[in-house]
Image (cartoon, helix red, strand yellow):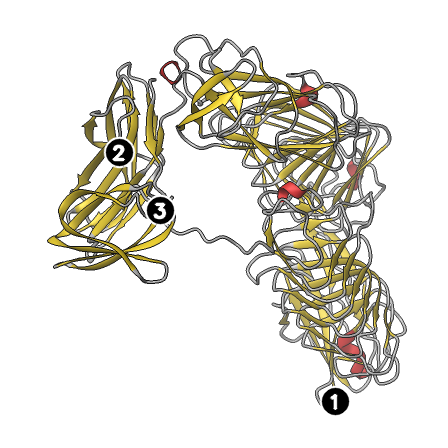
Amino acid sequence: MRQVCVVIGIIGCLFASPVWAQSTVTSGTWADPTVWSTGVVPGNTSTVTVGHPLTIDANISVSTGSYTFNASTTDFTGGTNYTLTMTGGTLTVGNGSNSPIVTFGGAGTFTNATVVVKNGATLVLGATTFNNGNTVTIEAGGTLIVNGTLQNSNSSGIITIGGIVYVNGNYDTNNGNLTVSGSGDLITTGTINNQGSSQVFGSNNDCNTGPCSGQNLCTGQLNNVTPASQFICAGGSIATLNGTTMTNVTYQWQSSTSGAAAVDFANIAGATSEDYTPPVPSATTWYRRVVTSTTIAGCFGRSVPAQISISPTGSWSGATSTDWNDATNWCGNTLPTTTTDVIINSNATRQPTISNANATCRNLTIATGAVLTITDRTLTVRGNLSYNGSIVYNGGVNGRLSFISSSPQIISGSTPYIFSNLVINNSSATVPAVTFSGNAITVNKNLILSAGTIDLGGYNITVGVSATAPGTLTYVSGRFYNGNITRWFGTGAVTLEADAGFFPLGTSTDNRPFYVGVTGLSTGGTIRVQHTSSPNSTPASFNDVNPAAAIQVVSNSYWTVSTANGLAYSGSPFSATAGGTGLGQVSDAVSHLRLTRQAAAIGGNAGTNGTSTTNLLVRRTAFAFPTNPFRAYIASTNAALSSLPISLSYFSARSTAEGVWLQWTTLMEDNFSHFSIERSTDGLSFESIGETPATGGLNKATNYSYVDGRVASGRYYYRLKSVDFDGSYAYSQVERVDVESSTMEIASIYPNPIDGKFTLHVYEGKSGTMVLHDAYGRSVAQSLINRGNQELDFEALRSGVYYARIQTEAGIQTIKVVKK
């Protein structure tokens, strides 16, 4: 298809964040500066918003900064336990409507800090100390987990628990005036020690035998329930829940199917005895006993919930041993097959190990706290994986999880997805064939990609764990999209277009591979590549090098390439190949294609490109990273021979009293036939509603418009189909329009932002005025206007933001205008 270039019009406002505010722009590792909007790793005074899942790979300190976590951020197990230290500032986990889990393996230390864990969010710390001056709030539905002792020295601060604080250890105070208040609970596996006048939920009693619930302290008695958990195969029987004997209290049993920290525990009618034998529930259920003192006003306590897991046939019981391949360890006494849905609960008698033979199942659920061990064997999952516990790989290097299916598969869960060896072989024609949802992915040793279009869900997949253990990729076919690929590299050479430097990226419809070659690094580290797909291309005017040539057009799609984790080099050791399908068709040889930046050369030498004109492979050799990160684009030195896709950068649709107005502008047309206007009511199925012939030419700006008057109230979607004389075509982006009977838009300005000259189109009113004001409200230009199109020239204006006040007899409208 021949070249058609169109100007992009951006409708809306962009407001720059203050330079001191930092937010994530992609998933990755915390210490990688390229995941941050400022290109710098946050400091202890920064204002930080984490909106993408990150791996914690550094200790984090906060003094006066404000850190907000709206995405899961995880210190992976098995490595360094990183710490969180706050000597001031604010830490907020969640926004009340999401469920991020922020995990530090190391200690937490807080002084003069504000900590808030919102509803649905979880903060996990190692042994933790609250020093003076803290305000700690765990909202209802929020959870704080401390793996170790929680030391409270917060004598001049406030700790309010509306949700749950779990301490896998002891809770200790070290002076006599420390207070914990709220309607939630403080639960420890060990003891609760209130020194002196310190109080937990209004009581300064101690709990000297775990597990302890802070809400029981006012009774001065233990309120425990045994057994703490039961695993029941379908059809099995339930043991009585035995509560400790207490005096001067009444009993009430409660249940929930949501979890131990749920806020929806409800009273069980008639269950008011010391002990309780529940009927067999239909699903996993948590039970707790609430006691109310008959002698102390307002004193009540809640036991640590006991979990009863009900599992169907095919669920792991661990009744005999840890051997997955022993049928007596399964509910129903039958080994799982490719049609069996497997559930592994944490309270099964024993946890499973796959060691003496390979194993298979359909759907696999690893519940929170459950552990599956794979020792030099393969577990093949034919369906979905719900990953909420952990998978441990023992032995050598051969333990693997293999996803093989001809139907779509989903990997979801609350735990970061860590695999030793991962195989993806999904032949489904559905896109995506495999979906990762909810967490980042790490493949420690070998990623084998045999088939499948894989949606990363916006997350990062990392291959390898260090420069000395960089992991490997074995590639047959398939691609990842909607996320990043991070790969570790050692100091050795990597051959260009070998699996060792391959990033199998793409979109939902096209392959967009990226290859890195390296002659050698002084220090190993990571390279991360992300692909951004954007339709069309843009005219360009800059020079490439070696050999020198003028670039005329650049594709709008690009790859973002960045280095991190200590990667260092000297000289120009890198080579790269980028390309794929859906980037346009070249009408002859491909030698005029170059790998460049958007408006500048990368450096190095132009390599010998691949021969395909539809599945492009464009090469660059012997270059150094021009910036970190940098964006790599496919460009052409001959626009007439290259159909890098058309640039529909200005295309708008607006509802007016006359119908839906479509407007677009081209800068260059060559051997181009016409535009077909297509409409949809669902955004999926489009129909042609009209055509507009091409009237532009080379180096000529041409404005187009079309009115769809055949619409009623409702939502519509529009796109342009750009058709060449040879019948080839490309689509624009889709514009959505909501049509209401009261819609009355007076005018529009396009393109916007403007270079100087622009078109004002008046929809409503025969004549009127337009007055242009600057950002301070001063009038800087004015013009008489009439119905229809008029060309206006504001080239003399400085760059900036202006406001056009348009008035006709139909009314007044103000339009924000950006002057480039």
**Kind of element beneath mark 3:** strand
* Label 2 to label 1: alpha-carbon separation: 74 Å
| Vertical order, 321 against 506 (above or below) | below
Return the residue at label 1.
294
Return the residue at label 3.
819
Q: How many numbered marks have been drawn onto this rendered protein structure?
A: 3
* Label 3 to label 1: alpha-carbon separation: 75 Å
Circles 2 and 3, Cβ within 8 Å, touching? The answer is: no
| Vertical order, 97 against 726 (above or below) | below
Mark 1 Cα-neighbour bin, 10 Å: few <14, some 14–19, many ≥20: some
Closer to the eye: label 2 or 3? 3
**Kind of element beneath mark 1:** loop
Circles 3 and 1, Cβ within 8 Å, touching? The answer is: no
The one of 715 and 769 positioned closer to us in this rendering = 769
The one of 30 and 65 positioned closer to us in this rendering = 65
Return the residue at label 2.
678
- Residue 234: tell me if it is visible: no
